[in-house]
Image: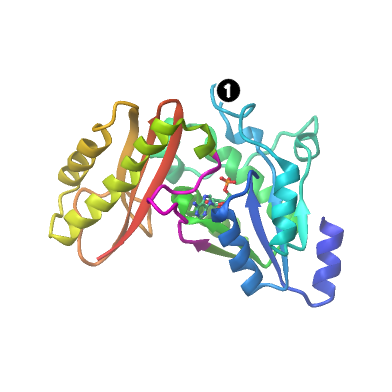
Amino acid sequence: MQRISDKLKAAGKSIGLVPTMGYLHKGHLSLIKKSKSKCNITVVSIFVNPTQFAPNEDLSKYPRDIKRDKKILTAAGVDYLFYPEADEIYPSGFQTHVEVENITKILEGEFRPSHFRGVTTIVAILFNAVMPHYAFFGQKDAQQAAVIKRMMQDLKITLKLIVCPIVREKDGLALSSRNVYLSEKERKDALVLNKSLRHAEQLVKEGERVVKKIISEMKKIIFSVDTSNLDYIGIVNAESFEPVKTISSKSSYYILIACKIGTTRLIDNILLKI
Ligand code: AMP
């Protein structure tokens, strides 16, 4: 991959990287589209990164279908697929990790303590493998994007990171490879994530500024279905990712939610611009 990138760069081509874990959907395709609009060459990586899954999580059953993914990538006009084996990325003797400190301790980090260390490590490796000019990530994983931004600032990684909006199903459910785990009833129940976010947005529009009140209203919607099991709802400043107690008119905020529906853990968020 490095040799290919070197050649492309020597020929004056700009390279965009879209890192994924595969089982591609329209959310991934929106990142690919953005990359193709900005860069001469688009590289998609597919790697179900073992170090970002805790032992009790869904690494072994994470959906995979490389044949289908390859077809999708060809149809989308992607130039290169980078599809490494786990032991190529983490050969025996591997002992280096990238760890971003404070911002990884809250929200996802509280419920998945080793997750972001795995994410930043693999993203740093992918950046070094592909050496892109641009990398494209989804707002769907807003905290992940913020953690990667922090890593890039701190490690002086100068490629440009572009965060693309969340792609949703018609009824509002955020697209996710994990949605295939949902039963028919759970698929309906899963709408409470988006509904609670929309309700919060409406409350803020109507003038509510107290985070506790907004969250307690959101919880009513979440707990209106019997399959939900909430991990967290958080409201953070969109720039610093610091949790806030009140909303002020000068800033932008993320409202973030992680909730199990049955046994499937889903995340969603909205960006509030006041
Ligand atoms: P994943 O394969 O789930 O690790 O996701 C790969 C990239 O696609 C990440 O940057 C995600 O944030 C992004 N992504 C996943 N779902 C969506 C979505 N519904 N809309 C936009 N981007 C998404």
Q: In the displayed structure, would residue 55 be above or below residue 46?
A: above
Q: Horizontal and vertical percent for residue 220? A: 20, 36
Tell me, yes or no, if residue 160 can be seen here.
yes
The rendered magenta stretch, by its main secondary structure, is classed as loop
Q: Is residue 182 left or right of residue 89?
A: left
Q: Say if 255 sits above or below 80 in the image.
A: above
- As displayed, is residue 150 above or below residue 23? below
Viewer-side residue, 158 vs 89: 89
Question: Is residue 249 within the magenta segment?
Answer: no
Residue at 70% x, 48% y: name it. 69
Residue 164 is one of the magenta-drawn residues: yes
Position of the C terminus, as image quadrant, is bottom left
Q: Residue at x 87, y 60 (%)?
A: 3
Circle 1 Cα neighbour tier, 10 Å, few/some/many (<14 / 14–19 / ≥20): few
Q: Is mark 1 within 8 Å of ligand 1?
A: no
The image quadrant of residue 39 is bottom right
Q: Which residue is mark 1?
A: 55
Q: Quadrant of residue 201?
A: bottom left
- Residue 103: x %, y % from top left: 43, 46
Nearest the viewer among 57 and 127 is: 57
Q: Residue furthest front?
A: 184
Instruction: Left or right? Give the position of 66 relative to 237.
Output: right
Q: Which residues are magenta?
A: 163-177
Instruction: Name the residue type under label 1.
Output: Pro
Q: Position of residue 147 (x, y in %)?
A: 50, 50
Residue sitting nearer the eye, 63 or 239 = 63
